Image: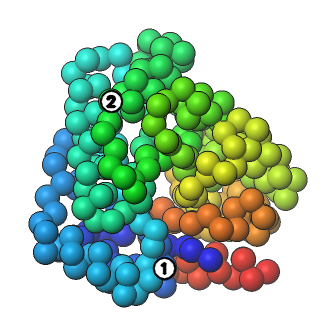
Amino acid sequence: MRVGAHESIAGGVANAVDRQLDDGGNCGQIFTHSPQVWQDPNIDDDDAAAFRESSVENDVGPWVIHSSYLVNLCTPKDDLRAKSIDSMQQEVDTAAKLDIPYVNVHLGAHTGAGEQQGLDNAVSALDELDIPDGVTVLVESDAGSGTKMGDEFEHLGYVLDESTQDLEICLDTAHAFAAGYDLSTSGGVDETLGELDAEVGIENLACVHLNDSKHECGTNKDEHAHIGEGLIGEDGMSAFVNHDAIRDVPLVLETPNEGGKGFAWNIERVRDLRAE
């Protein structure tokens, strides 16, 4: 099983591998810079080489780069669109430099342009990227609030179908739950993954952000909880991680560090649930 966490690159991107190993993970995710600002990735050749070598030597992977939170592919605003495309181009180029196969991105919000226009904006923005060989952009499911897109699996399927790029998806369990897909029971997990298969194709699921939720199903509130201790709960999480459809999909945790529990506790919890 491939399970790991979103690790910091403080002090150099190669340090993320050491942090992953300390937490007991064997795959993971990083930001290449602060996700709250427009900033270019600044990873020198030596650090990149150290990251690549350490990942291979310690069998840690696949890795995912998570794009900036400021990126909005659905936006109707020309300046924000241009910044979003430029930021994504730098992320996919950095992924190639680090031998990271995936760059994860949210669709963003249509901010009044309408759902269809927002989706078409996202498709055309993604189509402008020059994605290097060996790198795939993953469109992430969203919790949905306001005019944000990606909370419905149909949105993800539309973007994959209409884009000229070879895209795949990342399913966030807390986001899906917040968006109204009930993952708290075995039956709910079956139904949700069945709908994902129908709308997107389960073969296009490349990564899972495995998170429990602090809020009820369908609230559109995105706040992550420790695995099995949120409102998805132990039964739902166990059913999910043991489901045949995701057994070979990398699981990346974005769980909180609170109550004396961090990534290491949550990674071990996932392994315990899989063993069950």
In the depicted structure, whether residue 147 falls above or below residue 88: above
- Does residue 133 sit above or below 61 in this rendering? above
Q: Does residue 191 appear left or right of residue 176 in this picture?
A: right
Which numbered disc flags the more N-terminal residue, 2 or 1? 1
| The quarter of the displayed image where residue 111 is located | top left
Above or below 15: residue 136: above
- For label 2, the SS is loop
Please give the residue where the numbered disc 2 appears in the rendered image. 128
Secondary structure found at label 1:
loop
Colour convention: rainbow
In the rendered image, residue 106, in percent from the top left (x then y), is placed at 45, 40
Instruction: Locate residue 208, reporting x and y percent.
Output: 58, 58
Q: Is residue 55 visible?
A: yes
Residue drawn where x is 62% and y is 77% of the image: 1
The tag on residue 105 is none
Give the CA distance from mark 2 to mark 1: 34 Å
Q: Mark 2: few, some, or many residues within 10 Å (few <14, many ≥20)?
A: few
On the image, numbered disc 1 is attached to which residue?
25
Residue 49 vs 127, above or below: the answer is below
Q: In the rendered image, which quarter contains the C terminus?
A: bottom right
Q: Residue at x 35, y 16 (%)?
A: 76
Amino acid type, mark 2? Glu
Camera-nearest label, 2 or 1:
2
Q: In the shown orientation, is residue 41 left or right of residue 25? A: left
In this view of the protein, which residue sits in the foreground, 114 or 215? 114
At which x and y percent is residue 146? 50, 25
33 or 136, nearer to the observer: 136
Q: Residues within 10 Å of mark 1 (few under 14, many from 20)?
A: many
Q: Point out the residue furthest to the right here.
A: 187
Please report the residue visible at 74 percent of the width from the left and 44 percent of the height from the top. 197
Q: Nearer the viewer, residue 119 or 161?
A: 161
Give amino acid for label 1.
Gly
